[in-house]
Amino acid sequence: MPVPRRTLRDERRRRLGQNFLHPEIADRIVAEANFRPGELVIELGAGLGAITIALARRQVEVVAIEIDPVWAERLRDRIREMFRDNVRVVEGDFLSLPLPRRRPFRVIGSLPFRHTTDVLRRLLETPYIAVERADLIVQWEVARKRAALPPSTLRSTTWLPWWEFHLGRHIPAAAFRPVPHVDSGVLIVTRRQPVLLPRAMARLYSEFVRTHWPFDRSVSP
């Protein structure tokens, strides 16, 4: 039996890790994120626009980032047809695009699984950007691991003084097209108020954690 040939769209999906969320689930996730009117929201991996459209219906300012030029252009057309002026579609890679330094903003998006750590590092280890909260769709086991208390990984421990992690909605694989091999979940990351350590101590704290990891969890504090 001949093997079906991959189309250009199939190649883009494989290379960019594209799995598109069902619009109904996207709307629930946006509703549960409790956005306030006037907030600046940066969406990662806008794709077909399920989350973008849900955001567009709310009174927030949206910057939807999509690395795939085909989907970026199609999403611009959809937004234009909706007569929405609160959404701007940007074609590019989130990992290299400039982010707001002064105006507080929030982040939401469905991440390519292989870039989850890269995105978290960009958001949580860049001291001068003004991100306040991120609602990120990641692999379910990754969401559980990052939300664990006490932290179960070295990297999560280095982020602990400045960020809180919470486990949000579980999302079955069947909620995506094409269907991925694993379930997903929402990882909610919020900036601590107040922080546990001054940001100026980040390097020293990170060096301390890396030197003493793994900690002996059998010893009571």
Image (tube, rainbow, N blue to C red):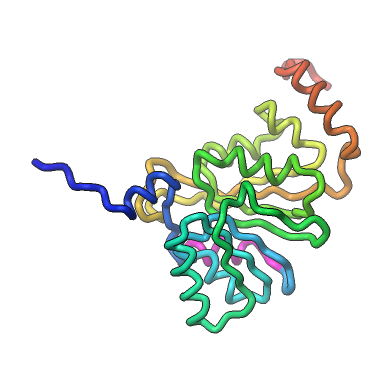
Tell me the quadrant of the picture where the C terminus can be found: top right
Decide: is 116 above or below 133: above
Image location of residue 71, percent across then percent down: 44, 63
Decide: is 211 above or below 98: above
Image location of residue 167, percent across then percent down: 62, 46
Task: Name the residue: 41% across, 44% down.
Answer: 15
Looking at the picture, tell me which residue is in the foreground, 142 or 150: 142
Looking at the picture, tell me which residue is in the foreground, 163 or 97: 97
Image location of residue 174, percent across then percent down: 37, 52
- Dominant secondary structure of the magenta stretch? helix
Residue 1 covered by magenta stretch: no
Task: Name the residue: 53% across, 55% down.
Answer: 45
Q: How many marks?
A: 0
Task: Name the residue: 90% across, 36% down.
Answer: 200
Task: Name the residue: 79% across, 60% down.
Answer: 104
Horizontal relation, residue 183 to residue 198: left or right: left
Image location of residue 90, percent across then percent down: 58, 63
Magenta-highlighted residues: 24-35
Tell me the quadrant of the picture where the N terminus can be found: top left
Residue 24 shows in this picture? no
Horizontal relation, residue 199 to residue 118: left or right: right
